[in-house]
Image (tube, helix red, strand yellow):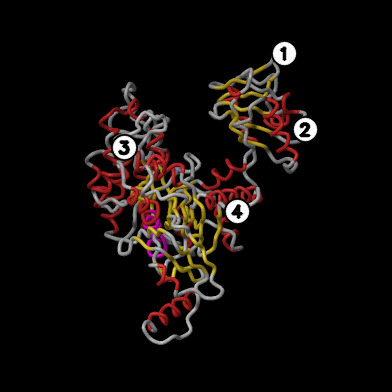
Amino acid sequence: MKTSIRAFIVIQLLCLGGQAQPRPAADLIITNAKVWTVDRDHPAAQAVAVLDDRIVAVGAGAEVEAWRGPGTKVIDAGGKLLLPGFNDAHVHLVSGGSQLDAVQLTDAASPEEFARRIGERASKTARGEWIVGGDWDETKWDPAKLPSKELIDRLTPDTPVFVYRYDGHLGLANSVALRLAGVTAKTLDPPGGVVVRDGKGNPTGILKDAAMDPVYRVMPALSHEQRVRVVKRALAHAASLGVTSAQDMNPDYADIAVYAELAQHGELSTRLYVAPYITGFEDQAKLGIRHAFGGPFLRMGAVKAYSDGSLGSSTAYFFEPYLGQPNNHGLLSDEMHPVSLMRERMLKADAAGLQICTHAIGDQGISIILDLYTDVETAHGDADRRFRIEHAQHMAAKDFDRFARLHVIASVEPYHAIDDGRFAEARIGHDRCSRTYAFRTFLDHGVRLAFGTDWDVAPLNPLLGLYAAVTRATLDGKNPNGWFPQQKLTVAEAVEAYTMGSAYAEFQEKEKGSITAGKLADMVLLSDDIFTIAPEKIREVKVEKTILGGKLIWDAASPPAN
Ligand SMILES: [Zn+2]
């Protein structure tokens, strides 16, 4: 199929200037657009023609119009901004989909509403399947009183329920769930946990912190059908946000099986690159799967490693201690004990041709990974291996040069900057924060950026990421002119990191990442021109249309039912 399209393109080129010969008409033409191509040779255009799943022409209206035939579908963009589809370099697709698929309780304004939603969900839930999630918030109720199992037991006689408070530190179990977990009046409070009891000493259903563990232990893993369902939820969400490609970190193998099944049925509407745990690198190595192996919808051949923890939990690993905690430098991950074992894994994974992506957040956590990457390069010589550091949050000043020299990709999430920016200085002080989410410094050193979200840790919406990178305005409103504003990016730089940058990070810069003839026709039409509106308005911009491989998979004018 593709060969024949290429052949047609060649025929067309040969005939330029000659007399008319049959050439295929475009399947789709987008006209009257402000096209920002992210193609440095031809940054701007007005129209795009698509044949099958590829872009065949990009240019002025008249040039592209020549591709129109009787069957060509035409989208008049009304002068709006057309960008390449967004490529999220770091997501957790199944967690994200699970969150979307869960019963939604955050805005339940009363205990009655809370119970009604759970009851409604139970009536649609297969027998024996759990109802989990919810993220409820009793402070929105009057009086603000924790719920008890009696509120929902009658509505859920056969359905185990365990719904969490939004902070994740406590949950409400119904009687079915308590029975399965073996929690009774006789259950003692575990260290670090509380089983809340009524006047007679019976559990009310509220379990705090470590007391939740017995419930987690009996909660079943997702079934194949559930996994298919949550992946479909995630894909629909991605389409509505213009995310046409995503790089899935730490999937279970069962997740990849679902992606493969959907891809085979033509239902995978986000192009995925998957990076399972490095601890299982031998599985891919045995099959001889190398980086970016697969097809346009599903690729593998990457592995994901962990260096350290996170800033939020004070476990990111630093050279200097956390402020006010002289003995806490953070923690290396269990995969790093000992570091020599991680080196060995990386050497073997690299020898097998796998791409290595490592979560590293604290400056020392990052530095050690750069040491290991250096060891791999020294042992195996120069190659286009595209090492990645995921998050790359807090850089030591001495490491920017090394980062660039090793051609390491900084796979970063700008939304985390405006989120962590609320509390980072209190944890690690001003100096270290000046090299935190240091996107400008990375670019100045010639480091390639790939943008992502870490969804479901942060929202999947790319416009929020662009907003964050361009404004660096923290979520608490305290830095309207930008938190460390010298690290702000321009809109063009941020868009490039979210498209070409992410495509490069998965070895696909020749296939996607820009609106260029020959590339996959993945594009988004935005409600507003992010290049000209006030930067603080970027977060309000919506995706009006998402086109994947030439097909319209999201249209805000006619969103899918449910
Ligand atoms: Zn992550």
Find disc 2 in the rendering and name its residue: 157
Q: Which mark is residue 558?
A: 4
* Along the viewing direction, whichever of 401 and 87 lies nearer the viewer: 87
Residue 271, image x and y in percent? 50, 58
Q: Position of residue 295 (x, y in %)?
A: 49, 64
Whole-angstrom CA distance, mark 2 to mark 4, is 39 Å
Disc 1, disc 4: CB below 8 Å?
no
* Sooner in the amino-acid sequence: mark 1 or mark 4: 1
Name the kind of residue labelled 4 in the image: Ser
Q: Nearer the viewer, residue 19 or 2?
A: 19
Alpha-carbon neighbours of circle 3 within 10 Å: few (<14), some, or many (≥20)?
Answer: many
Q: Tell me the magenta residue range.
A: 502-513
Mark nearest the camera among 2 and 1 is: 2
Q: Residue at x 25, y 45 (%)?
A: 400
Task: Report if residue 505 lies within the magenta region.
Answer: yes
- Secondary structure beneath dot 3 equals loop
Identify the mark nearer the N-term, 3 or 1.
Answer: 1
Q: Amino acid at mark 3?
A: Thr
Name the front one of labels 2 and 4: 4
Question: Could you tell me the amino acid type at mark 1?
Answer: Lys
- Numbered tag placed on residue 200 in the rendering: 1
Of tags 4 and 3, which is closer to the observer? Answer: 4
The residue at which mark 3 appears reads as 436
Marks 2,3: beta carbons within 8 A: no
